[in-house]
């Protein structure tokens, strides 16, 4: 593939054409962040095949697939039986996680309730795959604010904070009012009927009275971690 865009020279072979997919192996060179495979809608064999291409192209980088079901995870484990494979919160990560770069963390991932934990864990695994050191701070929602305040010294050490919350979605505003680090908010689909599958906390976060909160889409822990990696400009290639 040849050509120029925004001053960037694209080299031939920046993607691998598998017929059913074009795997973007050039993304790390362009953006510093990892390409990932979105498993939903793909067969287990397709997901494992795409991960194999990423591992071949970047053997020093963890290959990640998100939204994996049990069949997909089984196919990945079988395909990479001789390599480390982590399966957690619907994420399959193949390869050894990099040692966080000096000055690249810690990133804090905070979740309001235990029901929000799978989305937070998706963010944790993705962030670690991109070279970030991560601290998980679970179950500190605003209904028991003392739990959050107990963790405030730890949160103030973080260089970026991802805040995952459903229900009323108020936690990111509280955290952003207490720390100086960038805050990335993730609404979740956790909540009763009037939460509208996460729309209520999404709107709450978009209307935060704490200035400077960045908001990603509903249940998008992956997107929050990628935003944090770009904010911190971490290069995970070894």
Image (cartoon, grey):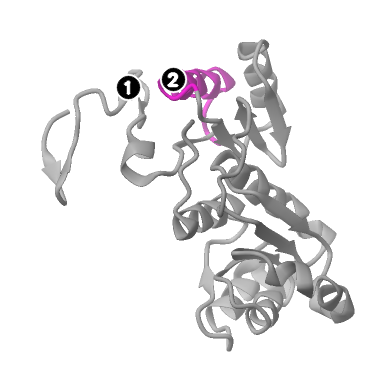
Q: Can residue 9 be seen at all in this image of the molecule? A: yes
Could you tell me which residue is drawn at 19 percent across and 35 percent down? 10
Q: Position of residue 154 (x, y in %)?
A: 76, 67
Asked whether 158 or 139 is in front, the reply is 158
Q: In this view, does 98 lie above or below 173?
A: above
In percent of width and height, residue 178 lies at 68, 82
Q: Is residue 30 magenta?
A: no
* Residue ID at (70%, 20%): 74
The N terminus - image quarter: top left
Question: Is 48 included in the stretch rendered in magenta?
Answer: yes
* Residue on which disc 1 sits: 16
Q: Residue at x 55, y 30 (%)?
A: 62
Q: Crowding at label 2, few (<14), some or many (≥20) Cα neighbours within 10 Å?
A: some
Q: Residue at x 84, y 64 (%)?
A: 139
Magenta: main secondary structure equals: helix
Percent coordinates x, y for residue 88 in the rendering:
73, 37
Of labels 2 and 1, earlier in sequence is 1
Q: Number of labelled discs?
A: 2
The stretch of residues the image draws in magenta is 40-59
The quarter of the picture where residue 153 lies is: bottom right
Please give the label number shown on residue 53. 2
The answer to whether residue 10 is left or right of residue 95 is: left
Residue 163 appears in which quarter of the rendering?
bottom right
Is 41 rendered above or below residue 112?
A: above
């Amino acid at each position: 593939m040849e050509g120029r865009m925004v001053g960037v020279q694209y080299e031939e072979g920046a993607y691998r054409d598998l017929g059913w997919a074009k795997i973007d192996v050039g993304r790390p060179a362009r953006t510093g962040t990892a390409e990932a495979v979105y498993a939903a809608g793909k067969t287990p064999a397709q997901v494992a095949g795409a991960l194999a291409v990423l591992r071949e192209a970047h053997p020093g980088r963890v290959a990640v697939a998100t939204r994996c079901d049990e069949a997909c995870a089984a196919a990945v484990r079988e395909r990479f039986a001789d390599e480390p494979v982590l399966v957690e919160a619907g994420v399959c990560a193949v390869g050894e996680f990099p040692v966080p770069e000096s000055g690249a963390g810690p990133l804090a991932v905070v979740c309001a309730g235990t029901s929000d934990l799978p989305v937070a864990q998706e963010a944790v695994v993705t962030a670690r795959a991109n070279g970030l050191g991560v601290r998980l701070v679970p179950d500190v929602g605003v209904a028991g604010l003392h739990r959050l305040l107990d963790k405030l010294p730890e949160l103030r050490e973080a260089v970026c904070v991802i805040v995952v919350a459903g229900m009323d979605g108020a936690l990111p505003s509280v955290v952003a009012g207490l720390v100086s680090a960038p805050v990335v908010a993730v609404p979740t689909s956790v909540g009763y009927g009037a939460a509208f599958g996460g729309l209520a906390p999404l709107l709450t976060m978009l209307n935060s009275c704490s200035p400077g909160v960045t908001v990603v889409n509903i249940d998008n822990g992956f997107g929050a971690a990628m935003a944090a990696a770009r904010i911190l400009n971490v290069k995970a290639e070894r």
